[in-house]
């Protein structure tokens, strides 16, 4: 009898110690399909290459740390078409999981069928965007600010925050989710912002062919044993080893602290080899001048010196996120590579690293073989685990 009681006590203690989040109320199982115990989002086993330097990029504010219940609420909000004024689109309508949380249209479609202003970016590892500003023109000072802007855009989702709060407050299935995430059922725009931001930040990407290789060598300049000869050639072109005249090539913007002139033989312990988004907006010579519909950061700041400057987005899942650039002008990765190879234009505010020593646009002048190799390397950044991860999928039964 005593032994049986001890076993029962151990079971109770074990179950209690494993429960760190509130259980989901299954009263709404006809509306959303959520596990009774929330998925784990807050305790992630990052690879060693996500080192202390990489974590210095982390833009998570102290008052909005990721919690399992917070991300669960954010996931429901992200996929809920009630977030738009006429219940026709959700955040996920422009950010499809299977497309790396981007859109396959040049510009997305808003709640009334109108076209949005820019191409929809994927946002894996958005929590590691070093500059902490969001959108193509950096107009959002934080992710918490960014997630509320599409909701209020007159083309995208057509809401006001007051209308949104009232609308969600009348949907009973949100009550247990807000209670679990924030300790009470009261819905506010601040809580909506925090939950959506938590969901977006929880979308980490580090399960790619590239990640297997970099974890093996811990040096981007060493051939990866799991790569084909073509992929290793593409990696060498990317990091500038094969194109020294191109001023380090792609790595200059997409892994900006990896300097091939310094690090080719031995990389320091703290270096970023996993976050492929740039530290600042750039003008990459897409247009010849500023007589275009969208001048990016320059238009936002009202400063022509920054015309044509746009965010340098992450290259992760690039294979899935076509079309490319802020206006979706390039349909394929091959077209993007060709731009850098031969197509950079002499815009008046062309970024310095896009110019040669004479101030002319810098072209990589890749051969067909080199272009194909660079494309092959970029495709090693595709995270198939992420796009099939149920934790980030649509939880609604009929939506």
Image (cartoon, rainbow, N blue to C red):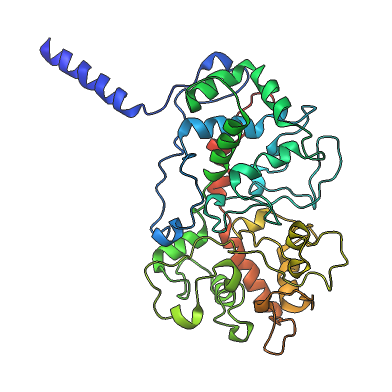
Q: Position of residue 60 (x, y in %)?
A: 50, 47
Residue found at the very far bottom of the displayed protein = 358
Q: Can residue 128 be seen?
A: yes
Q: Quadrant of residue 240?
A: bottom right
Vertical order, 302 against 154 (above or below) = below
Residue 157 versus residue 325: which sits nearer the camera?
157
**Residue at (76% x, 52% y) in the render:** 119
Whether residue 4 sits left or right of residue 191 in the image: it is left
Vertical order, 85 against 344 (above or below) = above
**Residue at (44% x, 69% y) in the render:** 225
Residue found at the very far front of the displayed protein = 302
Vertical order, 177 against 317 (above or below) = above
Residue found at the very far left of the displayed protein = 2
Quarter of the picture containing the N terminus is top left
Quarter of the picture containing the C terminus is top right
Whether residue 182 sits left or right of residue 18 in the image: it is right
């Amino acid at each position: 009898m005593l032994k049986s009681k001890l076993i029962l006590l151990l079971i109770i203690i074990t179950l209690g110690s494993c429960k760190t989040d509130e259980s989901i109320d299954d009263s709404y199982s006809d509306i959303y399909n959520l596990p009774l115990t929330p998925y784990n989002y807050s305790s992630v086993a990052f690879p060693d290459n996500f080192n202390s330097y990489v974590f210095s990029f982390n833009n998570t504010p102290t008052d909005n740390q990721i919690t399992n219940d917070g991300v669960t609420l954010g996931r429901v909000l992200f996929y809920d078409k009630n977030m738009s004024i006429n219940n026709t689109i959700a955040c996920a309508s422009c950010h499809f999981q299977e497309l790396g949380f981007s859109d396959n249209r040049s510009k997305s479609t808003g709640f009334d069928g109108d076209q949005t202003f820019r191409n929809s970016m994927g946002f894996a590892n958005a929590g590691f965007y070093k500059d902490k500003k969001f959108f193509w023109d950096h107009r959002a000072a934080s992710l918490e600010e960014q997630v509320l802007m599409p909701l209020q855009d007159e083309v995208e989702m057509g809401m006001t925050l007051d209308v949104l709060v009232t609308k969600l407050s009348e949907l009973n299935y949100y009550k247990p989710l807000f209670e679990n995430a924030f300790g009470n059922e009261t819905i506010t725009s601040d809580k909506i912002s925090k939950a959506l931001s938590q969901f977006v930040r929880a979308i980490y990407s580090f399960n790619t062919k590239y990640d297997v290789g970099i974890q093996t060598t811990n040096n981007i300049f060493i051939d990866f044993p799991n790569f084909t000869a073509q992929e290793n050639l593409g990696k060498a072109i990317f990091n500038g080893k094969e194109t020294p005249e191109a001023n380090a090539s792609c790595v200059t913007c997409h892994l900006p602290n990896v300097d091939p002139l310094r690090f080719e033989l031995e990389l320091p312990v703290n270096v970023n080899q996993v976050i492929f988004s740039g530290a600042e907006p750039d003008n990459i010579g897409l247009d010849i001048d500023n007589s275009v519909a969208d001048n990016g950061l320059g238009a936002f700041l009202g400063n022509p010196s920054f015309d044509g400057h746009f965010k340098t987005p992450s290259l992760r899942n690039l294979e899935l996120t076509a079309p490319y650039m802020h206006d979706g002008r390039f349909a394929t990765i091959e077209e993007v590579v060709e731009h850098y190879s031969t197509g950079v234009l002499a815009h008046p505010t062309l970024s310095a690293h896009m110019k040669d020593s004479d101030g002319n646009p810098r072209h990589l002048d890749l051969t067909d073989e080199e272009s194909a190799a660079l494309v092959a390397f970029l495709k090693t950044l595709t995270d198939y685990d992420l796009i099939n991860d149920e934790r980030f999928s649509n939880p609604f039964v009929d939506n």
